[in-house]
Amino acid sequence: MSTDFNGTWNIISNDNFESYMQALDIDFATRKVANLLSPQKIIEQKGDSFIIKTISTFRNYEVQFTVGEEFEENTKGLDNRKCQSLVTWDNNKLVCVQKGEKKDRGWTHWIEGDKLYLELNCENQVCKQVYKKVPPA
Ligand code: VLZ
């Protein structure tokens, strides 16, 4: 049985986000706005099939994938690049490698208790985010 990521998660900390966005060449004005956001993750998981929605008052981003199946990701509204992305399990961690123009790009998600962790990597930068589960209604 793999970890259950289903649910709505609210961000509670966001370390090194600015440098991560700079590594993605996100422009100054977008970074200023993005730094003020409190994004939410909405994750819909059925087995190895995932939809991860990143929701904010400024912009939304959605990615759909099946673990183990490479797909073309278009990071529309973020840095607007194309990547060949592959998500795999590393024990209970969900690890995405985003092959493309940027080196060492990807992310890792895992859960501890009622917290969802996310590390976003690009070039030499690591952004560490923590989300807290919103209790189901
Ligand atoms: O999340 O890749 O949960 O897609 C920030 C761009 C990049 C700034 C955020 C614009 C990347 C802000 C989020 C608009 C929200 C991301 C993955 C893991 C799934």
Image (cartoon, rainbow, N blue to C red):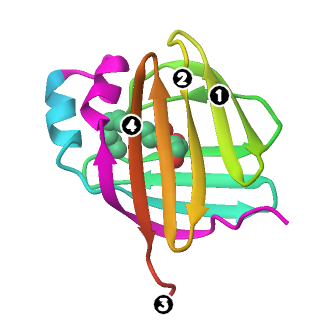
> Crowdedness of circle 1 by 10 Å Cα count: few (<14), some, many (20+)?
some
> Crowdedness of circle 2 by 10 Å Cα count: few (<14), some, many (20+)?
many
Q: How many numbered discs, if any?
A: 4
Q: Look at 48% across and 41% down and name the residue there.
A: 119
Ligand 1 is within 8 Å of the C-beta of the residue at disc 3:
no
Tag of residue 131: none
Residue 118 percent coordinates (x, y): 49, 48
Tag of residue 97: 1
Residue placed most toward the observer, 29 or 105: 105
Residue 22 percent coordinates (x, y): 28, 21
- The type of residue carrying mark 3 is Ala
Tag of residue 105: 2
Separation of residues labelled 2 and 3 (CA atoms): 36 Å
Residue 66 percent coordinates (x, y): 78, 45
- Mark 3 / mark 1, whichever is N-terminal: 1
Give the foreground label among 2 and 4: 4
Tag 3 near tag 1, CB within 8 Å? no
Give the foreground label among 3 and 1: 1
Separation of residues labelled 1 and 2 (CA atoms): 6 Å
- The type of residue carrying mark 2 is Arg
Give the foreground label among 3 and 4: 4
Question: Which residue is identified by label 4?
Answer: 127
